[in-house]
Image (spheres, rainbow, N blue to C red):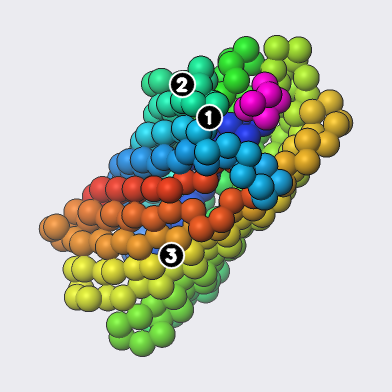
Amino acid sequence: MTAWLGATLLAATAQQAVAISVDPGDYDHAPPGTTLGLMYYQYSKGDKLYAGGDKVSSDASLRAQVGMLRLVRFIEVGGITMTPQIILPFGSVDTGGDLGGATVRNGVGDVILGSGIFLYRDDQRRVFGIMPYLTLPTGQYDRDRTLNPFGENRWKFTLQAAGVLPLNDKFTLDVVGDVQFHGDNKRFGESRQTMSQKQVWELQTHLRYHLSPATTLSASLFRAEGGETEIDRVDQDDRQRRTRMMIGASRFLAPNWQLMGHIGRDLSVGQGVRENLRVNLRLMTIF
């Protein structure tokens, strides 16, 4: 495995660990004055490496454990509900086989700032909102390392739009789309090259079944496209294509405490390591 292949595909795969994905129910409206504190744990693993849609290795071990702390506040501005928030990711990534020697432990990621804006909502729980995110280059970054999964040494802007559509008393459909824009990393690699990246587009759908007022089951499908990179204006031919599915459940353990869990895997990957297992856990408190 060449150094170029390892560096390019590891970077593309590791950035998936801290991508801005949405959990079922994230765009449900809450009264202004509500504050949410959230803790996340994500575990993923894979061993098959793909480039250009073709499998290039069956021995490319990648294991990621990522935690996130998130604080969300519902406020009202001019009659519109908004949700200013801050997200801090951290964790570790272990590699082996053809991708050995790039392990990163105890990394602190780039801080993410955002604010949801509820443009429409009604008494039937239908919602349409947008969420701009700004990712700051505050995380740990070392240009001499092959892998920098948490600090990317660049600014990023993500614009997300979402609709919540109750189908009946038991089923609710969430549809979320976003586009991510990237600044340049002007200290990429040992030679301090400039890495540029095109937009990444993602579509997320979540079908929820409300088993009871406290318990919800869900099935989710994610599709990401784009994100080709250039290094010193040389196209790396590394367009990302990834489809993932997950199933999960959430339950209020008490009126102000909710536990959510999901399990899933990649269905297809065009570039990077294909995840054969992903586990997401989230603990939320309302105050």
The numbered dot on residue 250 is none
Q: Which residues are magenta?
A: 1-6
Q: CA distance from mark 2 to mark 1?
A: 8 Å
Q: Is residue 172 left or right of residue 179?
A: left
Please tell me how crowded label 3 is: few (under 14), some (14-19), or many (20+) other residues with Cα within 10 Å: many
Nearer the N terminus, badge 1 or badge 3? 1
Q: CA distance from mark 2 to mark 3?
A: 29 Å
Residue identified by numbered label 3: 220
The numbered dot on residue 104 is 2
Please tell me how crowded label 2 is: few (under 14), some (14-19), or many (20+) other residues with Cα within 10 Å: some
Tell me the SS state at disc 2.
Answer: strand
Q: Position of residue 158 (x, y in %)?
A: 62, 48
The quadrant in which residue 67 appears is top left
The residue at 63%/39% (across/down) is 56
The quadrant in which residue 137 appears is top right
Q: Quadrant of the N terminus?
A: top right
Q: Residue placed farthest to the left in the image?
A: 254
Label 2 sits on what residue type?
Val
Q: Position of residue 105 (x, y in %)?
A: 41, 20
Nearer the N terminus, badge 2 or badge 1? 2
Tell me the SS state at disc 1.
Answer: loop
Q: Is residue 56 left or right of residue 259?
A: right
Tell whether position 95 is magenta: no
Q: CA distance from mark 1 to mark 3?
A: 25 Å
Q: Is residue 269 left or right of residue 45?
A: right
Let me know if residue 70 appears in the view: no
Residue identified by numbered label 1: 149
Q: Position of residue 4 (x, y in %)?
A: 70, 25
